[in-house]
Amino acid sequence: MDIAGSFASYWYFHVPNFVLAALMYTMLGRFLLGLFVDADSPNYIWRFFCRFTDPVVAALSIVTPRVTAPAVLWLFGFVWMFWLRVVLHYTLLVLNLAPRLVGGAS
């Protein structure tokens, strides 16, 4: 299987899947780091996690009750990103647009 050819042929699958995976794992990282770091910490890794995931948290806060703790909201974000990736893959499989493994693994 030609990796570069596969990426070029299925960019519409790989790019959104990568973005959703990056958001998903960054939300998990924000939750785990939030257990050890204060919310207003000057730590550059914490600031990156916050800056990268704040748009997702803002979108989730619209549909989530205000009494929800921020850490729970971050975990909800992780779960939402996971299910968005599943829906993306399933939709492209149904439409016969997803990459498939051709032949057997050696």
Image (cartoon, helix red, strand yellow):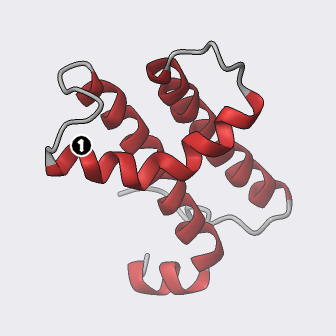
Q: Is residue 99 above or below residue 94?
A: below
Packing grade of label 1 (10 A; few <14, some 14-19, many >=20) is some
Using the image as rendered, state which of residue 16 and residue 65 is in the foreground: 65
Residue behind mark 1: 46
Amino acid tagged 1: Trp
Q: Is residue 23 above or below residue 96?
A: above
Q: Is residue 95 visible?
A: yes
- Residue 83 appears in the rendering: no
Say which residue appears at 39% left-offset and 42% top-offset.
25
Count every numbered label the image shows and give the total: 1
> In this picture, is 96 found above or below 54?
below
- Farthest front residue? 40
Which residue: 61% across, 62% down?
100
Residue at the spot 55% in from the left edge and 59% down from the top edge: 17
| Residue 50 located left or right of residue 55 | left
Q: Measuring from the top left, give residue 65's x and y in whole percent.
A: 72, 19
User: Residue 102 lies in what quarter of the image?
Assistant: bottom right
In this rendering, would 82 be left or right of 37? Answer: right
Q: Is residue 76 left or right of residue 31?
A: right
Q: Is residue 77 above or below residue 97?
A: above
Residue 24 is situated, as x and y percent measured from the top left of the image, at 47, 43
**The C terminus lies in which quarter of the figure?**
bottom left
Image quadrant containing the N terminus = bottom left
Q: Position of residue 15 (x, y in %)?
A: 54, 70
Looking at the rendered structure, the secondary structure element under dot 1 is: helix
Q: Nearer the viewer, residue 105 or 15?
A: 15
Q: Residue furthest right?
A: 95
Q: Residue furthest left?
A: 43
Q: Nearer the viewer, residue 16 or 30?
A: 30
